[in-house]
Amino acid sequence: MLAIAGTVPSEGFPLIDGEIILEDNHIRICDEYISINRGTPALMAAAIKTAETLGQPAPFGYLIGDIGLGKGSRRLYKYLTDHLPQSDFQILTFHYLQPIVHWHERLQQALHEMKKLPILIADAGFMYVAKMSGQAPMYDLFTPDIGELAFLADEKAPHPFYTRGFILHDENRVSDLIARAYTHNNAARFLLVKGKQDYLASRQGILETVDSPVEEALEAIGGTGDTLTGIVSALIDSGMSIPEAAVVAMKANRLAGFYAKPTPATQVMEIIQHIPKALSKILEKRV
Amino acid sequence: MVFENTSEVIQAENALKREGWEIRVMGPPPEIQSGCDLIIEFPLIEELNILRMLENEGMPPLEIVPVTSPLLQPVDLFHIKDFGEYLMVRAANMKLTVEKATGNIVNVSGGGCPDVPFLACEMVGHTLADAPSPREIGHTLCGYALQLAFEEMQRQCSP
């Protein structure tokens, strides 16, 4: 089973955990309704749409409110540290959490207390802290965009904000950036790089590239990376290998974006609606 | 000077610059990095005066650490993408997109700290002129990067 952990942008939002349910334009965990605009709720909504399409059970969610002060993230780190050792999730996806190194280390210890170490996926703030802690190789999949790939490639940068200028955020240098990230052990077992073209890479280099359909506007739309992470997480949960799931997810996310006929003003929920159709189309082609 | 969080750094930076102190917001040295950090670099000779001022303002630093090696510099490169009716500015990992005709903020993307979705909620739908600035309501390095993108967008869209 897949579990997803992250935050919502509301200071008073309580710590909740449970099955994630999608109702209209909201997700629901227990009795709490959360609007889907971007961030972890967008990731969760994309994962649910994917699971529904595949006839899989809904993922499990851990959520708390945090507006950037880190209070909610700290509570969630502690909760996960206390509860995950007793759980039996096969896949864990960590998302918008405040990057806090000592909490990351404690959580890593808790993960190693689980009966079997799950497949570990990290995006957003949790990917930052995984890299900064020097623990990136422990993860199975990171999902950076080009700017975040440059951060992974910069062995000195503790956060994308400090990526040095000579490490250009340039799509033409993706291969070099990937190699540099692996050279310094700052990448997960697989990288799914989101951009004008999407790339699947490992220590061996670029394994797959997906470049169509092209919708330039997607780069401006908040949450399109979150949906990709949600789709790939749910596909892996369905039993696909990570490389197989990554390629299907890259294609399906792009196609869902294409179906939404996006402009730079499009909101991510409009794209999420098209995930089932896009995913069905991609899976149909594979048969 | 090390502070509790990035929003305290931003407040202290504003106060110190207002008083004319020559300071720089920088990345912390590796030995005190804890996650999402900024620090303020100041001339050691002014320590007492600066501390007094910050204490009077109710924002004393958590600690003061002597630094001998070069500090990490915040990103200072911007990427501009013109979509025709829309303009996007990227600073580090943060992207801000505006409708050119109206100055309306239509999207905020990128970033990974928890204030990014919060900032997006607060800013999208407002114009550059009336949107709250990330400097005022953000708390993390992603918020600070969005502030840089916001300022660059204001420069790009000014007549």
Image (cartoon, coloured by chain):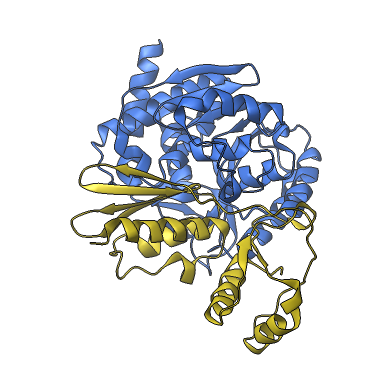
In the image, the chain rendered in blue is A
Residue A208 in percent (x, y) is at 50, 17
Front residue of A91 and A190:
A190
The image quadrant that residue B156 belongs to is bottom left
Front residue of A130 and B100:
B100
Q: Is residue A185 above or below residue A212?
A: below
Residue pictured at 75% horizontal, 41% vertical? A111
Residue A250 in percent (x, y) is at 43, 26
Q: Is residue A121 above or below residue A161?
A: above
Residue A161 in the figure: left or right of residue B33:
left
Residue A262 in percent (x, y) is at 26, 39
Residue pictured at 61% horizontal, 53% vertical? B73
Question: Hue of chain B?
Answer: yellow
The answer, for residue B104, to whether it is visible in the render is yes
Residue pictured at 40% horizontal, 40% vertical? A224
Front residue of A120 and A172:
A172
